[in-house]
Image: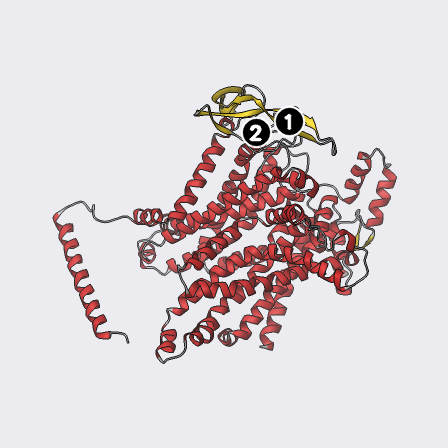
Amino acid sequence: MIAYIVKRILGMIPTLIIISIITFIIIQLPPGDFVTTAQAEIAASGGGMDASAVEAMRIRYGLDQPMLVQYWRWVSGFPRGDFGYSLEWSAPVWDIIAGRLGWTLLLSGLALVFMWLVSIPIGIHSARNQYSLGDNVFSFLGFLGLSVPDFMLSLMWLVFATMTLGISASGLYSPQMVDASWSLAKFLNLLNHLWPPVVIMGVVGTAELIRIMRGNLLDILNQQYVTTARSKGLVEKVVVRKYAVRMAINPMISVLGMQIPKMISSSIIVGFVLSIPTVGPIFLRSLITQDMYLAGTILLLMTVMLLIGNFLADIALAWVDPRIRFEQ
Amino acid sequence: MIDYKGRSEHIKKLYEQQNALDESIAHQMMSSEKIAFATSQWRMMWRKFIRNRIAVIGGTVILLFYLTALFADFVAPYTLKQRMTAYSFLSPQRIYFFAEGRFQPFVYGLKGSRDPKTLMKIYVPDPEKRIPIRFFIHREPYKLMGLFPASTRLFGVEEGIVSLLGTDGQGRDMFSRIIIGSQISLTIGLVGVALSLIIGAFLGVSSGYFGGWVDNLIQRVIEIVRSFPPIPLWMALTAAIPPHWPPLRVYFTITIILSLIGWTWLARQLRGKVLALREEDFIMAARLAGASDGWIIFRHLIPATLSHIIVISTLAMPAMILAESALSFLGLGLRPPLTSWGVLLKQAQNIQVLLLYPWLMIPGFFVAISILAFNFLGDGLRDAADPYTV
C-alpha cells in the first residue's frame, strides 16, 4: 500500500511541472500585460501615464524580463509558499487567496458529502424497487437536476429566498450579522447561508451518482453470488447491505474522484452569483485585469486540488477493494 | 423453490422453436432472391428508439428548437436591436385568445405611468383598447437565414406592443431576443461537438487501433488536458480573446476553446470501443485481404462505431450549451452584439434587477429545457444503439 502511494506521488511530479508550464503560457496569452490594462483603465477615467512611468512600472513588476525568467521567478517561490505578488491588490498572492481557498475546499467537500449521503440511499431504493413510482419520480428529478445549470439554480434560489421567504441569500452572513461578534446566532446565520450553495453544487453530481448506484446495484443483484446468498436463507436486508451494496459502492468511489472538477467549476459560478468568497469571483477579476500571478496561481492550485482529489479517491478505492491493491 | 425441471423443459421448447425458425428462414432465403425479411441494424435501432416515449419527446423538442432557430427572424415579432423606448422593463403581457366568443387573439393597450412611491415606470392595461394580434403581418424587413430578404412575420401588432416575455431596460422584446439568441446558443453546441468529433474520432480511433507509442502519447495528452478543471480553464482561455475581434471570429474561437477539452471525452469513449472491435474477425479478415490502415479505419472502424459516435455526440451537446451560457453569463464568453442565451442572462446577474424584473431570468429556462431535451434524447439513443438487448 505504501509503495503504491509513493509511486502515485512520484508519478504526479512530471504532470505538475507540465501543468505549471501550460498554466503560465495560458495566463500570458492575452495581448498586452497588467500595465496595458491598468493604463487603459486610467485612460478610461480621464487620466494618463507617460511612457517613462509605464516603463518604470514594467521594470518594477519584472514584466520586461523574458518569459522564461518570469516563469522561473514564479515557480521557484513555490517551495517557500511564495506564489508571487498580486499586481492589482499589491499583496502576496497567497495572502489574498488563502482564506478563499478554504471556503472553496469547505463548500466542495460538503457538496461531495451531500452527494453521497443523498444518492446512495436513493440509488438503493430505486434499484430494489425498479420501475416503481418512487424510482420513476427519482429518475425524473435526476434528469431535471442534470439539466438545470448551477448559475440558474443559484439565481432562482436568490429570487425565491428574497421574494418569498424574505431572507438574505447572498454572502456568508445576513447584513446585520456581518460585523457582529461570534455567537451561536451568527454561527446559525452562517449555516443558513452555507447549505444552499452546497445543495446547488451537489445537485448535478447527485443526479449522476443516483443513476450509477442504481445501475450498479441492479447488475449485482442479478449475479449468482447474490442468488446464492438468498438461497442459503439470508435475510433480504443482509443480502442487500452486506453482499450487494458492498460491491456496488466501489465504482462510486472512483466516480467521486470524477466529480471533483465539477465541484471546482461549480464553486466558481455559485460563489460568483451568491457572493460567497470562494476563489471564483477573484479569479474572474484577475483574468480581466490580467493580474497574471494571481490568475495563474488560482488556476494552478485548482488543478492541484483536482490531482490530489483523484489521488485520494484512488487510494480510497485501493483501500476498499483489495483486488486493486494486489494488481499494483 | 425454483422449478428446475419445468425450467429445463421450457428451455428445450425454446430451443426447438428457434430451430424451426432458423429452418424457415433458411427456406425463405433459398426460395426467394431478395432478403426482405432481414431487418437492418438501423431499422432495429429506430424501432427501439420510437418505443421510448421520453426520448421521442426530447427529440421532438430539439427538432422544434432548431426549426425555430432556423426561422428565428420569421418567428420573432421584432428584430434583435429594435428598441421600443416607451416600453422599457415591461413585464410579460397577458394574451387573450377569444374576443366576443370567437378566436381572435389580442392584447390590451398600455398606459404608462409612474409609481408614486418608487417613481418606477409601471404599465397599466387599458381595457378600452384592444390591440388584435395579426398573423403573417408585414413588419421590419429582415433576411431569412441571412439570405432571403423578407418582411413577413409570424405574428405582430399594428400599433402598441406585443411582448410575450417582457422587455429589457432598453425596451427590446425578450421573446424576440431569446428566439434569435437561440441561433447562437444552439449552433455553438453543434459546431463545438462537430469540432470535438473530428479531433476526438481521429485521435481516439487511431489511439485504439494502433496502440503502442501512438496510444501512449495520445493518452498522456488527454490526461494532461483533463487534469485541468474545465470551467476555470475555459475562463482563462476565453479571457485571452482580444476585445476588438470581430464577432464571427469570437464565435469560432469560443467553439474551438470548448472543443479543446470536449474532444478528450469523445476520444476516450471511442478508443475503448475500437480496442474491443480491433480483435474482431472482420478486422482481421480485412487485414488479411491486404487493406491499408486508412481503409480499415475509415471503411470499417468508423462505420462500425457510427451509432456510438452519434450517441456520444448527442450526450456531449448539453455540456457545450451549458459551458457557453455559463461563460457568457460570467462575461467571458460571447459578448454583444453577439446574442446568446448566456449573454441575455448577463442582465440578470444583479439581485436588485432580478427582484424588480424577474422575467429577465427566462433565457435560463430555455437553457435548461434544451439541455433536458438533449439528455432525454441522448439517453434514448444510447439504449437504442444496442438494439440486441432488451
Amino acid type of the residue tagged 2 in the rendering = Ser
Q: Give the x, y percent position of residue A23.
A: 67, 53
**Residue at 57% over, 26% down:** B79
Q: What is the chain letter for disc 2?
A: B
Q: Which residue is mark 1?
A: B87
Q: Secondary structure at mark 2?
A: loop
Q: Secondary structure at mark 1?
A: helix
Q: Is residue B92 left or right of residue B270?
A: right
Q: Give the x, y percent position of residue A203.
A: 56, 56
Q: CA distance from mark 1 to mark 2?
A: 10 Å
Confirm whether residue B213 shows in the render.
no
Q: Give the x, y percent position of residue B142.
A: 53, 22
Q: Is residue B39 left or right of residue A92?
A: left
**Residue at 55% over, 42% down:** B365
Looking at this view, is A319 or A227 the one in front?
A: A227
Check whether the beta carbons of the residues at disc 1 and disc 2 lie within 8 A of each other: yes
Q: Give the x, y percent position of residue A125.
A: 46, 65
Q: In this rendering, is residue A15 above or below A232?
A: above
Q: Which residue is mark 2?
A: B163
